[in-house]
Amino acid sequence: MKLYFTPGTCSLAPHIVLRELGLSFELERVRLGEAPVIASTQADYLKLNPNGYVPLLELDDGRLLTEGAAILQYLADLAPAQGLLPAASPIERYEIMRWLVYISSELHKMFSPWLFHPEYGEQAGGVARVRIAKRLELVEHQLEGRDFLLGERFTVADAYLFAIVSWAKPCRLSLAPFPRLQAHLERVGRRESVLAALKAEKGA
Ligand SMILES: N[C@@H](CCC(=O)N[C@@H](CS)C(=O)NCC(=O)O)C(=O)O
């Protein structure tokens, strides 16, 4: 398996999960932009993903899978015993899927593009910050009495939340009103898989 990733982006979530599960994988860095390329070869990345974004997972049989939320579920299902996405208890699984969709549509796509593209201007950025902060209230509420989104167990949703909400600081979004979320980020940030993923991406 090969994960196409870019440091500092949402591809950190499947990268963390690959390490959590102890799966063997290769990393391939992508330089994003108008004409994204595979960093090691300068090959045209659009040939692999015409939408030009990461993450992209290349399976051993050559199949390509995009969309972070789908990749996270696929990976977790490769090692069900590890419980990053429970299969045995359907409602818990759908609650995790609910969080994956919430993070993808209400957080991820509010940060990006609005806070990553200066061409949208300060006004759009300001609106995005207010909306994201509103959406984070639900996350803060969910974390009451819980170490992770679904309780005491780390799941794929926590990996995704960590990757996205880590953008708050560079995007000048204050997390001061969300102490439980801050504690969650610190807790997840201390995990071996996360430290290893960040180290590998820094050196890539
Ligand atoms: N719908 C995709 C979006 C992925 C996405 O937005 N990736 C960003 C990095 S966080 C990216 O590669 N952006 C570059 C671009 O859109 O050109 C998913 O959920 O996986």
Image (cartoon, rainbow, N blue to C red):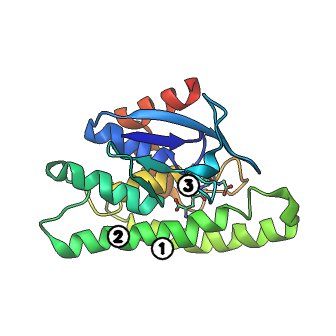
* Image location (x, y in percent) of residue 190: 40, 36
Which amino acid lies under the numbered mark 3 shown in the image of this protein? Answer: Val
Q: Secondary structure at mark 1?
A: helix
Marks 2/3: CA distance? 18 Å
Q: Secondary structure at mark 2?
A: helix
Which of the numbered marks, if any, corresponds to residue 165?
Answer: 3
Marks 1/3: CA distance? 14 Å
Judge by depth and name the residue closer to the eye, 105 or 135: 105
* Image location (x, y in percent) of residue 100: 42, 66
Q: Residue tagged by mark 1?
A: 138
Q: Quadrant of the N terminus?
A: top left
Q: Secondary structure at mark 3?
A: helix
Q: Does label 1 or label 3 sit earlier along the sequence?
A: 1
For mark 2, does the 10 Å Cα neighbourhood hold few (<14), some (14 to 19), or many (20 or more) residues?
A: some
Indicate the quadrant where residue 136 lies. Answer: bottom right
Q: Does label 2 or label 1 sit earlier along the sequence?
A: 2
Nearer the camera: disc 2 or disc 1:
2
Marks 2/1: CA distance? 16 Å
The answer to the question of whether label 2 and label 1 lie on touching residues, with beta carbons closer than 8 A, is no
Nearer the camera: disc 2 or disc 3:
2
Judge from the rendering whether residue 142 lies leftward or rightward of residue 91; answer left or right. right
Q: Residue tagged by mark 2?
A: 97
* Image location (x, y in percent) of residue 188: 40, 44
Judge from the rendering whether residue 180 lies leftward or rightward of residue 167; answer left or right. left
Residue at point 31% right, 57% down?
A: 74
* Image location (x, y in percent) of residue 40: 60, 28
